[in-house]
């Protein structure tokens, strides 16, 4: 999928309903919904659709739903976000089968985690891999070169310079809940 969020370099991630509502008034087309509750999902998607926003839903953080294939099926069929983000490959796999944007989130804590992630990404090719923490430009570059999968940089990104470094290293965008970074033009 050669679909890099219409060149949007920041993917703002709403940690709560208030942030999500504030994002409705921005120019961002693609937004991430982090924490949510299963009972709120349909209303939040309706709001996003009214404002022509494409929601990338972090399935692992939906309260009231287990982060598994059944939850992913329900979300794809009933809630219909633009894409799913998860650390769980079966969830991301369902998104890909249903033609949603499939984003595999990986925590690269050490060499073992990196090698495990490479094996996972080789066996299953998501549309994007979200690399956490996103403040390691040399690792982002390595992941992109090794896997050929477009990368997102997420986690611990606090400054404009860190966003620029991640993008220069090959990330197509940075995911952040820092509203200060939402205001910067890249």
Image (cartoon, rainbow, N blue to C red):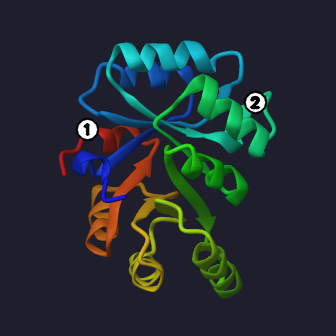
Q: Residue at x 53, y 54 (%)?
A: 103
Residue 47 lies, in percent from the top left, at 45, 14
Q: Say which element carries label 2.
A: strand
Q: Residue at x 59, y 24 (%)?
A: 79
Determine which quarter of the picture holds residue 80.
top right
Is residue 17 shown above or below 60?
Answer: above
Is residue 168 shown above or below 158?
Answer: below
**Is the residue marked by circle 2 packed among few (<14), some (14-19), or many (20+) residues within 10 Å?**
some
Residue 27 lies, in percent from the top left, at 23, 29
Would you say 24 lies left or right of 80 here? Answer: left
Q: Which numbered tag is attached to residue 63?
A: 2
Residue 152 lies, in percent from the top left, at 42, 60
Quick check: can you spot residue 174? yes
Residue 75 lies, in percent from the top left, at 64, 31
Residue nearest the observer in this picture, 169 or 177: 169
Q: Say which element carries label 1.
A: loop
Proximity of marks 2 and 1: CB atoms separated by less than 8 Å? no
Lower sequence index among marks 2 and 1: 2
- Mark 2 or mark 1: which is in front? 2
């Amino acid at each position: 999928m050669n679909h890099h969020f219409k060149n949007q370099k920041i993917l703002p991630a709403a940690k709560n309903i208030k942030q999500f509502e504030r994002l409705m008034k921005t120019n961002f087309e693609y937004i991430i919904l982090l924490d949510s509750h299963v009972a709120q999902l349909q209303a939040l998607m309706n709001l996003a659709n009214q404002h022509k926003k494409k929601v990338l839903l972090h399935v692992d953080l939906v309260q009231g739903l287990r982060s598994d294939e059944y939850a992913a099926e329900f979300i794809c069929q009933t809630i219909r976000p633009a894409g799913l983000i998860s650390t769980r490959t079966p969830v991301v796999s369902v998104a890909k089968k249903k033609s949603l944007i499939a984003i595999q989130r990986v925590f690269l804590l050490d060499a073992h985690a990196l090698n495990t992630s490479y094996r996972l990404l080789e066996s299953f090719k998501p549309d994007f891999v979200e690399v956490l923490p996103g403040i390691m430009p040399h690792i982002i570059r390595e992941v992109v070169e090794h896997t050929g999968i477009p990368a997102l940089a997420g986690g611990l990104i606090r400054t404009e310079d860190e966003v620029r470094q991640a993008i220069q290293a090959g990330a197509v965008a940075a995911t952040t809940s820092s509203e200060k970074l939402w205001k910067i033009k890249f």
